[in-house]
Image (spheres, rainbow, N blue to C red):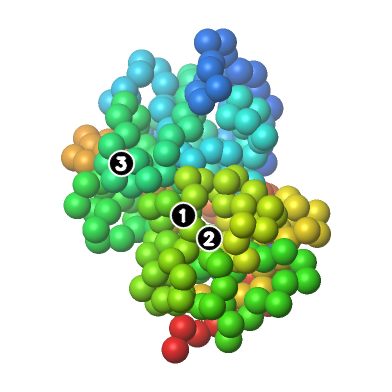
Amino acid sequence: MRSIRTTAVPALTALMLAALTACGGSAAGGDDSTTHTTDAKGTTYGKCKVSGERGSIHLKTVQKDTLTVVGDLPSPGWWNGDTVKQIADGYEYCMAANIAYRAGLSKLTVRNVSFDALVAGKTQDFDMALAEISITEPRRKVVDFSAPYFASNIGVLVTQGSKASAKNLAGLRLGVKQGTTGADFVRDKIRPKTAPKVFAGDVELQAALQAGQVDAALTDVAIVLGKAQESKGKLQVIGQYNTGESYGALYPKGSKNASVLDGAIGGMKKDGTLDRLSSTYLAKAFGGDPSTIPTWSTK
């Protein structure tokens, strides 16, 4: 069984198997409900304490002196907060903050976008996207990806007391997130008797599960574990499917910043930044060890 881990394996794997960076700042004005901008305060963006050498990389950003990052926000552990405006830390937020600092940028703007539109290459005016996005060849046709920075399986989220199991899952009402590889996996590998219900985002998918509209929600383990933790015992992750998938940062097709951003992400793997972010944010959000979740087969 393969546990969830960053590709900078050693430190994270040990931490997550044991019980499976530090991030304070202030926000700039002019935000709306889908966009939020944070001003750097020394070596902090929001609650993220960043590292590395300021100005060690150079980016051609869509907004002056600002790194603009888009994603499907918020997301427990990755982008912490109940609203976009409240997001001030999390693995991917602080990952972006570290990149902004190393690029010598004084502002970090985050914007909530449709995941489906993002991976279809329809989102405009951003420097990079961080949204737990699985790297696939079809997506590469319309967007560019960084090297993998996190590996993920597909998890099965149900309500407490559910009778769902590996044997009967295909006969149940399943829910998936629009435009995700999880949706493709359910359709192509699990092949449910009834077409799964498709939801726009994680919030809608979780709400449908809790409302009894679906019997199980299937998406990345890293996401469903966070949702189970967030539900305070109402939901649980009962199984996972090994897909061999990994997350990558997404860039607009043909981005002139791709090689520089790739170098920055590679640097954060090498210097331990990604491991520290994982131990700080994901262990708490997951609320458990992914390696203890039974791995199910589609055969």
Residue 41 numbered tag? none
Tell me the kind of residue under disc 1.
Val
Q: Which residue is mark 3?
A: 251
> Given contact means CB atoms under 8 Å apart, are the residues at marks 3 and 1 in contact?
no
**Residue 98 to residue 267: above or below:** above
Q: Which of these two is toward me, 36 or 218? A: 218
- Distance of mark 3 from mark 2, alpha carbons? 28 Å
Distance from Cα at disc 2 to Cα at disc 1: 6 Å
Q: Residue at x 41, y 27 (%)?
A: 67
Residue 118 lies, in percent from the top left, at 35, 41
Q: Residue at x 61, y 18 (%)?
A: 27
Q: Earlier in the sequence, mark 3 or mark 1?
A: 1
- Per the model, the C-alpha gap separating discs 3 and 1 is 25 Å
Residue annotated with mark 2: 175
In this view, 62 is above or below 142: above
**Residue 9 can be seen, yes or no:** no
For marks 3 and 1, give the one nearer the viewer.
1
**Residues marked 2 and 1 touching at CB (< 8 Å):** yes
Quadrant of the frame with the C terminus: bottom left
Which element is circle 2 on? strand
Residue 234 in percent (x, y) is at 78, 58
At 54% from the left and 66% from the top, the residue drawn is 174
Judging from the image, what secondary structure is the residue with disc 3 in?
strand
Count of picture labels: 3
* Residue 232 on image: x %, y %: 80, 54
